[in-house]
Amino acid sequence: MAPAMGRIMPPIERSAAAARRIGEVLADPAASGWLKAALAAAERRDPVDAAADAHVLHALLEARCAAILADSAEAMDAPLLPLA
């Protein structure tokens, strides 16, 4: 059961809720193998280090995605070259 809005959860409940959410993703057949492997590996690491690395990974992947989407949008707006 989800905590009521505004209710402060004790530390043990927060840890259990976080572990439960990770377990749900690991058990989800729709979750990618890559995500499941990353979560499983992160669980064996120091959580602060894992979160810091995940933050860097997020920034890098977000920038890569934005660049690819921008390049794609520009390519779609480019005039077509005449066929020989």
Image (cartoon, rainbow, N blue to C red):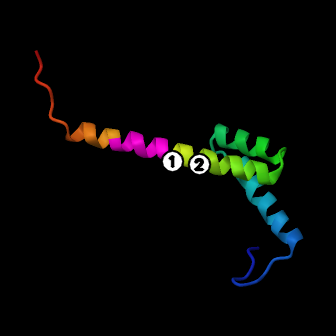
Report x, y in % for residue 34.
65, 38
Give the dominant element type of the magenta stretch: helix, strand or loop: helix
- The vertical placement of 21 against 42, above or below, is below
Q: Amino acid at mark 1?
A: Glu
Residue drawn at (37%, 43%) of the image: 69
In the picture provided, is 33 more to the left or to the right than 81?
Answer: right
In the picture provided, is 24 more to the left or to the right than 77?
Answer: right
In the picture provided, is 80 more to the left or to the right than 51?
Answer: left
Single out the residue that lies furthest toward the bottom: 6
Q: Quadrant of residue 11?
A: bottom right
Residue drawn at (73%, 74%) of the image: 2
Q: Quadrant of residue 13?
A: bottom right
Q: Secondary structure at mark 1?
A: helix
- The vertical placement of 81 against 71, above or below, is above
Report x, y in % for residue 77.
20, 41
Q: Are marks 2 and 1 in contact (CB under 8 Å)?
A: yes
Disc sitting over residue 62 in the figure: 1
Q: How many marks?
A: 2
At label 1, counting other C-alpha atoms closer than 10 Å, the crowd grade (few under 14, some 14-19, many 20 or more) is: few
Q: Which residues are magenta?
A: 62-70
Q: Quadrant of the C terminus?
A: top left
Q: Which residue is mark 2?
A: 58
Q: Secondary structure at mark 2?
A: helix
Residue drawn at (42%, 46%) of the image: 66
Q: Amino acid at mark 2?
A: His
* Residue 66 counted in the magenta span: yes
Report x, y in % for residue 5.
69, 83
Single out the residue that lies furthest toward the top: 84
Q: Is residue 38 visible?
A: yes
Residue drawn at (75%, 54%) of the image: 22
Q: Quadrant of residue 67?
A: top left
